[in-house]
Image (cartoon, rainbow, N blue to C red):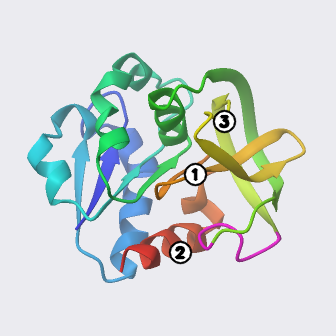
Amino acid sequence: MILIIDLCRKPDSLSKTEFVNPVAEIVDSCGVIFKIMHYKEISCEDINKADGAILCGTALKDNEFLNDIKLFDWIKTINIPVMGVCAGIQVISGVFGGKVVKDKKIGMTKVSCVADDPVISKKEEFEAYELHNYSVTVPDCFIEIARSDDGIQAIKHKEKSVYGVVFHPEVRNEWVLKNFIISLI
């Protein structure tokens, strides 16, 4: 079961339709069982039952989750694959000691793979959609695996299957999420 984590300010907000449901549709298209939960409602039992987790993005001005980074410390200790999308990479970077930095981007960007990786580097270059007010610095225990002229686009933990992407793969790059899901099967 993949745990799809809603990082929006309120459970069942309108933003869930834009940022969470498209991820769920991609997971469903892979024939994998999933459960959508708001980050404030997740228990240790929910995490322990998961085979993987995807932390979804949020609306531009919805950054409340950044006040609750401690709720995500489980990412450091659990041994399941985790993918953070946009807001999700901000959570992952924060959990592992990176910084969230002001960096407003809206629109398409050209992404280049800078490290070999089965989830991201299936294509050397691709166009991706960005919608964010913040980006991240790469924590010491991560490597950068994709970037654009503007900066970091994807990171991966050096020892664990923990990924983060700044762009929104659910918009134009479903293959990124599908590759992540395939890595779980």
- Placement of the C terminus among the 4 image quadrants: bottom left
Residue at 59 percent across and 27 percent down: it is 98
* C-alpha distance separating marks 3 and 1: 11 Å
Q: Which residue is mark 2?
A: 179
Say which of 83 and 156 sits in front.
Answer: 156
For disc 2, the neighbor class at 10 Å (few under 14, some 14 to 19, many from 20) is some
For disc 3, the neighbor class at 10 Å (few under 14, some 14 to 19, many from 20) is many
Q: Which residue is mark 3?
A: 138
* C-alpha distance separating marks 2 and 3: 22 Å
Q: Which residues are magenta?
A: 118-124
Residue 134 lies, with reference to residue 16, above or below; the image says: above
Q: Is residue 88 left or right of residue 73?
A: right
Residue at 66 percent across and 35 percent down: it is 138
Residue at 38 percent across and 73 percent down: it is 184
- On the question of residue 166 being in view, the answer is no
Q: Which residue is mark 1?
A: 158
* C-alpha distance separating marks 1 and 2: 18 Å
Residue 6 appears at what percent x and percent y? 33, 43
Q: Earlier in the sequence, mark 1 or mark 2?
A: 1
Say which of 113 and 40 sits in front.
Answer: 113
For disc 1, the neighbor class at 10 Å (few under 14, some 14 to 19, many from 20) is few
Magenta-highlighted stretch: main secondary structure? loop
